[in-house]
């Protein structure tokens, strides 16, 4: 609170009446209390930044005696240096056999007209089904729980593609996140990260040059 203190005399000097001098002293105690109250309020109501992380589920390796089924609706992305993305569809084949020809790698990049368009084309049928459900949901023809269940079933359908993400030792973490972001943007329901195989690494090396760190 501001206090007004009177000082000085009111006597006369030279026959003239002199005005009284006044001094002010501002009490800052209430302002300090208010500052601490505001600080406490903002500390208690502020949202602290959370560490940015992403949870990834890695499939357990199959037992040695278990036969691995052929990946018919699978697309494998092989990430390498210089932001390069190689891919192939179906089962990997190191050489021609009775079931098909030797695997050859195609290449994509992170531009809008490459990886994004590729995923958009591959998942067009699935996205159209989900959009049809979304229209019904917005028109109150489907309950929330029913809508979510049907969308989940469409994503998990055996006819939809499964995407395998593999990296060599020169791929960057950013590239992995960018690929996963594109998969999520294109409403892809099935994707996993697995180790790159040596035959796959050999094909990548033919495109990029020798690399180390391959796993058998």
Image: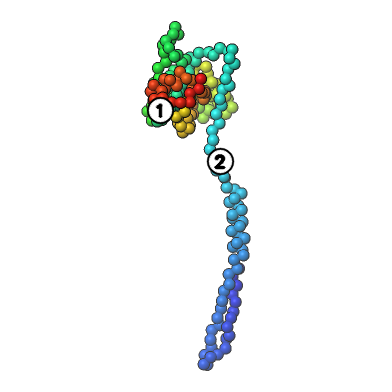
Give how far apart the Cα atoms at labels 2 and 1 are.
Answer: 31 Å
For disc 1, the neighbor class at 10 Å (few under 14, some 14 to 19, many from 20) is some
Does the CB distance between marks 2 and 1 fall below 8 Å?
A: no
Closer-to-camera residue (19/25)? 25
Which image quadrant for residue 66? top right
- The picture quadrant where one finds residue 120 is top left
Please determine whether, in this image, residue 37 is positioned above or below residue 67: below
- Residue beneath the point at 55% across and 43% down: 49
SS under mark 1? loop
* Residue 65 % position (x, y): 59, 12
Instruction: Tell me residue 216's x, y (percent).
Output: 51, 20
Of 69 and 198, the residue lying toward us: 198
Report which residue position mark 2 lands on. 50
Please tell me which of labels 2 and 1 falls first in the chain: 2
Identify the image's colour scheme: rainbow, by chain, secondary structure or one colour. rainbow
Q: Position of residue 13 (x, y in %)?
A: 53, 91
Q: Which mark is residue 21?
A: none
Instruction: Name the secondary structure under disc 2.
Output: loop
Please tell me which residue is depicted at 40% across the width and 19% down the height of the picture: 105
x and y percent of residue 22 in the render?
A: 56, 78
Indicate whether 25 appears above or below 181: below
The numbered dot on residue 84 is 1
Looking at the image, which residue sits at the far bottom?
15
């Amino acid at each position: 609170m501001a206090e007004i203190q009177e000082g000085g005399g009111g006597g006369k000097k030279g026959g003239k009446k002199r005005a009284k001098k006044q001094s002010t002293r501002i009490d800052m105690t209430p302002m300090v209390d208010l500052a601490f109250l505001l600080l406490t309020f903002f500390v208690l109501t502020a949202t602290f930044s959370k560490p940015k992380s992403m949870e990834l589920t890695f499939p357990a390796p199959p037992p040695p005696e278990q036969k691995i089924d052929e990946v018919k609706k699978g697309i494998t992305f092989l990430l390498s240096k210089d932001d390069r993305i190689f891919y192939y569809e179906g089962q990997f084949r190191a050489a021609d056999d009775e079931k098909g020809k030797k695997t050859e790698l195609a290449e994509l990049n992170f531009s809008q007209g490459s990886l994004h368009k590729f995923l958009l084309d591959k998942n067009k049928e699935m996205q159209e089904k989900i959009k049809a459900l979304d229209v019904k949901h917005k028109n109150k023809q489907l309950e929330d729980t029913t809508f979510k269940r049907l969308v989940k079933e469409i994503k998990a359908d055996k006819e939809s593609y499964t995407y395998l993400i593999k990296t060599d030792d020169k791929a960057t973490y950013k590239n992995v996140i960018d690929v996963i972001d594109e998969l999520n943007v294109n409403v892809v329901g099935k994707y996993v990260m697995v180790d790159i195989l040596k035959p796959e690494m050999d094909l990548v090396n033919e495109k990029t040059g020798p690399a180390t760190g391959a796993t058998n």
